[in-house]
Image (cartoon, rainbow, N blue to C red):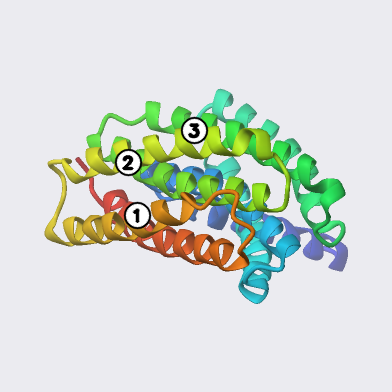
């Protein structure tokens, strides 16, 4: 007969095993993994964007919610991706990402947004992005379907929307001013090319075409707002904040639809 201690140990072991199964089940297949891995790229940029917006006093309530929610989501998805990792190489990528993420997370949350830490936040956001990109690409490389490519491409559009906004807000706070214009222009050209490729994808359903047209319309407003780089008018920074979120929301719908495709 098992002792009370042994029973407690057995129950704890079963609980831990069940949690491991749930964590793995959160990522159901490669398309799901690519979507979440790609979302980590986006979050790396979105958190920095929100940090700079808080420092600027732009859209403060929503920026605080964006930062807090993004930190929590990054934590959760990182655990799911580590549990799913289908190869040692991918597991090592996510172990590296976890270490870099802990440093970035600490910098984001240890104190209120301040200029002294701004340059470090900008640099760490790119370090996390590089590792998140590596993991996403490794996952796509394991797939044999065209939909995996579209999930990755559409997911990268989410990141680019946040990256452009990040550099705009950083420059408005006098951080990374010397690189902002070039980085925004590079991301702008990639976003426009990606939007064109997605619009031409043979996998597109009527619902996807409708969402992509909405993104195209939103992009016109966003691109115009980005053209105000260097403006001291806080209203322009607010427009960048809100339009980047609208594009992100619509692109999430697009990625979700590609994720469900199986060919």
Residue underneath mark 1:
219
In the image, 101 versus 94, the foreground residue is 101
Residue underneath mark 2:
192
Q: Give the residue displayed 33% in from the left and 31% down from the top.
A: 143
In the image, 17 versus 74, the foreground residue is 74
Residue 233 point in image, percent of width and height = 61, 63
Q: Quadrant of residue 249?
A: bottom left
Looking at marks 2 and 3 on the same chain, the residue that comes earlier in the sequence is marked by 3
Q: Residues at badges 1 and 2 in contact (C-beta under 8 Å)?
A: yes
User: Which numbered marker is on residue 137?
Assistant: none
Inter-mark Cα distance, 2 to 3? 33 Å
Q: Give the residue displayed 64% in from the left and 27% down from the top.
A: 92
Inter-mark Cα distance, 1 to 2? 9 Å
Q: Which residue reaches farthest bottom?
A: 61
Q: Give the residue displayed 40% in from the left and 45% down from the top.
A: 157
Q: Which residue reaches farthest top?
A: 89
Looking at marks 3 and 1 on the same chain, the residue that comes earlier in the sequence is marked by 3
Q: How many marks?
A: 3
Residue underneath mark 3:
86
Inter-mark Cα distance, 3 to 1? 36 Å
| Residue 210 to residue 143: above or below | below
Q: Left or right: where does residue 166 sit relative to residue 52?
A: left
Under circle 3, the secondary element is: loop
Q: Residues at badges 3 and 1 in contact (C-beta under 8 Å)?
A: no
- Which mark is in front, 2 or 3? 2
Under circle 1, the secondary element is: helix
Q: Quadrant of residue 189?
A: top left
On the rendered image, what quadrant is the C terminus found in? top left
Residue 6 point in image, percent of width and height = 82, 60
């Amino acid at each position: 007969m098992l002792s009370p201690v042994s029973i407690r140990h057995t129950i704890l072991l079963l609980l831990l095993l069940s949690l491991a199964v749930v964590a793995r089940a959160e990522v159901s297949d490669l398309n799901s993994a690519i979507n979440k891995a790609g979302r980590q790229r986006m979050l790396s940029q979105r958190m920095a964007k929100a940090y700079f917006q808080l420092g600027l006093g732009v859209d403060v309530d929503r920026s605080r919610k964006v930062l807090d929610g993004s930190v929590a989501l990054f934590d959760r998805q990182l655990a799911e991706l580590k549990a799913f990792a289908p190869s040692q190489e991918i597991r090592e990528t996510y172990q590296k990402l976890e270490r870099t993420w802990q440093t970035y997370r600490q910098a984001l949350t240890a104190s209120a947004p301040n200029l002294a830490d701004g340059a470090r936040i900008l640099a760490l956001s790119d370090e996390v992005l590089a590792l998140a990109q590596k993991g996403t690409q490794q996952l796509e490389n394991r797939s044999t379907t065209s939909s995996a490519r579209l999930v990755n491409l559409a997911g990268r559009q989410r990141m680019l929307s946040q990256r452009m906004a990040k550099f705009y807000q950083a420059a408005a706070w006098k951080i990374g001013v010397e690189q902002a214009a070039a980085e925004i222009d590079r991301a702008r050209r990639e976003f426009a090319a990606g939007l064109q490729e997605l619009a031409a994808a043979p996998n597109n359903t009527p619902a996807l075409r409708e969402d992509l047209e909405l993104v195209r319309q939103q992009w016109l407003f966003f691109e115009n707002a980005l053209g105000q780089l260097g403006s001291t008018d806080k209203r322009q920074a607010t427009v960048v904040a809100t339009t980047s979120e609208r594009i992100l929301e619509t692109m999430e719908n697009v990625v979700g639809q590609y994720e469900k495709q199986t060919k």
